[in-house]
Image (tube, grey):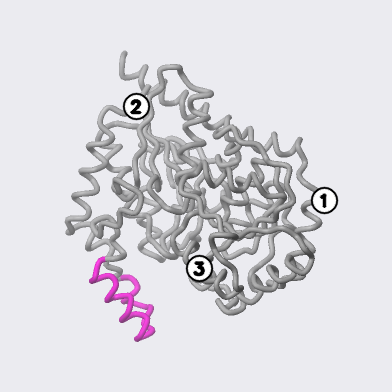
Amino acid sequence: MKIGLLGEYYSKNLGDPLLFSCTEYLCRKEGASDLQIKNIDIFGRTFSGDDSVWYYFDKNPIVLGLKVIRKLAKIFGVINTLWLDEYIWQMGTARKNLIKSFRDQMQGLDGIIVMGAGSIKYDVRLNFAPYYMAFMTTASELGIPVFINCAGIESKYNQKDRRCRQFCKVLSMDILKIATTRDDLNTLKQMIHNPHTEVARIADIGVWSAETFNISKKETNIIGLGIITPIRFAEFKRRITPQQYEEEMLKIINTLEKQNKKWKLFNNGDVCDSEYAKELCEKAGINPSDKLLTPKTPKELVEIISGFQGIITSRLHSCIVSYSLGIPFVAISWNNKLKYFADNIGVSERVMDSDELNFSRVLEKFELAVSQGYCDINKEKYRQTSIVYIKKYLTAIEEEMNGRRQ
């Protein structure tokens, strides 16, 4: 059996490539001994840091120009429906190159498992519908069944929005056999109009990070402070300003210093997060080389988090990795996915909305989280949902293979 794992394989935000490692781990653990795996990047990138404009339709000068016009003119009616992604998708070299890349990489595959991450969205940061259309259409032409694994749903169902309708169309293709989400099951059901596609909510596969890399939590009293660029709060229309976020993080650092507690800053590898963390160090009068940890690989991210007593963070997969390791977290939310995850594992009180960010409340929640830990029974029940569906994907692929042989 030969399967493709498809997603943001070359993203520098290591929460995305982490999913490839965890999925491969479970596929090999639960699958056939002769299993072959190929990793495919959804944007057609061939190395980390590859920012070829061919694969980023939103970076096309025409699209960027339209965005500026819309922002300046504050026109959202007709112009909003004339979004140029579709034009570029149909006419541009980008579409041809990306489809050729997918076709070349998908030849000979028996099935494709999509690393869902936060890719089911169309109205914040990036419209993923054209990319889904590219690989789903290619998979359909080649007769390769597709399975979406633990996707994050970051846009609401809006039938009036052309981009949403495009997403619904591609998610309703017959080639999609099973689609699972880590969070908003209701919206996923609304977007899939094919009654033959199985839909379910399961754990994010990152909950297997510790086993994937054979890493255990260390005995330590160091507190990890996960840093995110404040740009994310603005993109998701949170009321907190960059200055407010910075002030509260500096207050947390100063308080820990006064209490003589050990701490370090870290990030998930994202370039913007890393650069902002360096700026924060400078404003705190700290040498980044002494206090800032920036991972280069998913394994390094897990290794870094394993060295903390607990973490205060805003990135979802730092929370998921810490949960996998049995390390408590407190999250400052910029996106509903953090609340969904905390709700699913029974610790909703550990997520604080960024609009209500207050350093003393964050530290109070952190102390409580460290003292409480997690419920091991609920944790194992939650994690098993990943295994159930990995087995389903592999079984369905094998059945398709047997059907072709007959």
- Tag 2: amino acid: Asp
Q: Residue at x 69, y 52 (%)?
A: 343
- Tag 3: amino acid: Tyr
Query: Which mark, residue 371?
Result: 1
Left or right: 53, with 76 as reference point: left
Left or right: 358, with 272 as reference point: right
Q: Residue furthest top?
A: 406
Tags 1 and 3 touching, CB below 8 Å: no
Q: Is residue 259 magenta?
A: no
Give the quarter of the image for residue 123.
Answer: bottom left
Q: Quadrant of the N terminus?
A: top left
Is residue 201 among what the camera can see?
Answer: no
Q: Is residue 64 magenta?
A: yes
Q: Residue under label 2, please give it.
A: 110
Left or right: 52, with 264 as reference point: left
Looking at marks 3 and 2 on the same chain, the residue that comes earlier in the sequence is marked by 2
Q: Of 336 and 164, which appears nearest the observer?
A: 336
How crowded pointer 2 is (Cα within 10 Å; few <14, some 14-19, many 20+) is rated as: many
Q: CA distance from mark 1 to mark 2?
A: 47 Å
Is residue 341 among what the camera can see?
Answer: yes
Q: CA distance from mark 1 to mark 3?
A: 31 Å
Helix, strand or loop under label 1: helix
Q: Of 192 and 36, which appears nearest the observer?
A: 36
Q: Position of residue 232 (x, y in %)?
A: 51, 67
Residue segment shown in magenta: 60-81
